[in-house]
Image (cartoon, rainbow, N blue to C red):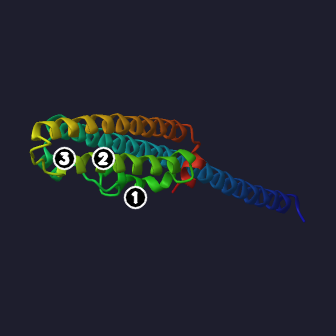
Amino acid sequence: MSEIERKIEDLIAQKEQQQQESKKLQQTKLEIVSDVDVVENARGIKAEIISNLRMAKTSHMKWISDVQILIRLGDIHQANTTIPVNYTSCDFGKWYYGEGQRLSEFSEYTDIEEIHQSVHDTYLQIYSLYKKPIEGSLFNSAKKQMAEREEKARKLDVILKQYSKLLFELLQTLEKKVKSLSSDEVINLI
């Protein structure tokens, strides 16, 4: 083999080696881009989960506000149209049994269910107080019945607020946990 043929073979070998190295670099670049995409996607998913969690929290605050209207005004018609009695029918319940299921691996999420049901059970008692018509009688005047109803409603309202406070604390803890998740952990929530 002549000197020129050896140089040509060396150049061909170098070119093949460079092509292989170029392919490896391309593959590494694709992997890096893919990792960046995963991180960006995870950030978007995390932001969406937190946003939905906050909207659920806000919807519960509105629901509680509507209950306060019922208690303060004794307006059952308002309650009939705006305050769901069933814990799966309110906006918070729809989130919990829908989108919120992504967070079901967290103990706080599981704890929320019982407290949320207790909130609605307590509200059902309040609702029932106002649903029952007041009819004055000889021994039990309408004014006395209304006063008794209001007293019972205030006591139940204290319980309702305690349950709501626990619910908000769990939601706050859950939000902190979601914020602290790594990209891989967020992707696993999907």
Q: Which mark is residue 98?
A: 1
Q: Is residue 128 above or below residue 152?
A: below
Q: Which of marks 3 and 1 is in front?
A: 3
Q: Which badge, 3 or 2, is on the more N-terminal residue?
A: 2
The amino acid type, in three-letter code, at marker 1 is Gly
The amino acid type, in three-letter code, at marker 3 is Tyr
Residue 134: % across, % down: 12, 47
As helix, strand or loop, the secondary structure at mark 2 comes to helix
> Pointer 2: what residue?
123
What residue is at 34 percent from the left and 49 percent from the top?
120
Instruction: Say which quadrant the N terminus sits in.
Output: bottom right
Q: Which badge, 3 or 1, is on the more N-terminal residue?
A: 1
Q: Nearer the viewer, mark 3 or mark 2?
A: 3
Q: How crowded is mark 3: few (under 14 residues within 10 Å), some or many (20 or more)?
A: many
Q: Which of marks 2 and 1 is in front?
A: 2
As helix, strand or loop, the secondary structure at mark 3 comes to helix
Q: Which badge, 2 or 1, is on the more N-terminal residue?
A: 1
> Pointer 3: what residue?
130
**Along the horizontal axis of the image, is 171 left or right of 123?**
right
